[in-house]
Amino acid sequence: MTADHISSVNFNENGLVPAIAQDAESGEVLMLAYVSAEALDRTRETGRAHYYSRSQEALWEKGATSGHTQRIEEIRVDCDRDAILYLVEQTGGACHTGYHSCFFRRIDDETVGEKVFDPETVYD
Amino acid sequence: MTADHISSVNFNENGLVPAIAQDAESGEVLMLAYVSAEALDRTRETGRAHYYSRSQEALWEKGATSGHTQRIEEIRVDCDRDAILYLVEQTGGACHTGYHSCFFRRIDDETVGEKVFDPETVYD
């Protein structure tokens, strides 16, 4: 069953689609990353958000290092089946910089997000 | 000034970055599309969301055909500057299928979104 649902996703030529993580309770958009079929499969199996790191060329579980995991409440696909939405319960902050959301800055560089942890105490 | 801000965005090898449109009031994630430097520039100049269509290989203004435009309230960039978040006021529905959001379906195919218009009466 899992395989059927995943085969209906239109992965790009690199075998990836963008995945948006959104806080299921507050609605805040937390981050955008990429998922492979394997990452999506692992996410559905474990109930915790997994992604594929293009720079590391590897599957990763969000929060495996920091403890800032994302518990999956729901997974959606868009109309074209080439983008994924993870509705999550975020432990700590989604952003490695310490902000709750990676989208903590306006394009004019003004900071609008909330810092929830000190990255130096988490990634040591 | 516009050029400075746009030059700080890390466009990919195709000159694009993914852009998430989110309803500024409800927090609903509406769609994911791509923007070029030109699309981002036009968005900031006009206050209406513009994207770049990879299939049409052209700049497009959301709602130019359907009337379902997106008025920009705020533009954010993520920590890595390789993803954009448009906070918008959506007229009508964001999805060409008639749903308010393109993410109207769970990955198991159950429909959870709300249909707000009949596409046959809009795209004729």
Image (spheres, coloured by chain):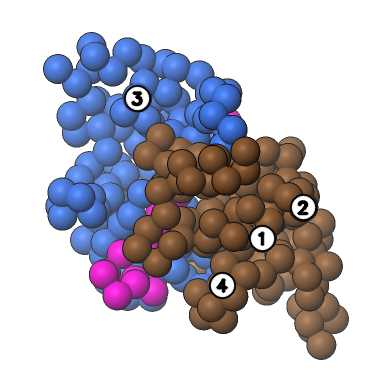
Chain colours: A blue, B brown
Residue at x-position 68% and y-position 53%: B43
Q: Position of residue A68 (x, y in %)?
A: 30, 27
**In the rendered structure, the residue with mark 3 lies on which chain?**
A
Amino acid of disc 2: Thr
Quick check: do tags 2 and 1 share a chain?
yes
Q: CA distance from mark 3 to mark 1?
A: 29 Å
Give the residues in magenta: A10-26
Closer mark to the observer between disc 3 and disc 2: 2
Q: Which residue is mark 2?
A: B46
Categorize mark 4 by other alpha carbons within 10 Å: few (<14), some (14-19), many (20+).
Answer: some
Contact between marks 3 and 4 (CB within 8 A): the answer is: no
Closer mark to the observer between disc 2 and disc 1: 2
Residue at x-position 20% and y-position 50%: A55
Residue at x-position 71% and y-position 66%: B61
Question: In the drawing, what numbered circle is on residue B53?
Answer: 4
Amino acid of disc 4: Ser
From this viewpoint, is residue A1 visible? Answer: no
Closer mark to the observer between disc 3 and disc 1: 1
Q: Which residue is mark 1?
A: B50
Element type where label 2 sits in the image: helix
Q: CA distance from mark 3 to mark 2?
A: 32 Å
Q: Quadrant of the N terminus of chain B?
A: top right
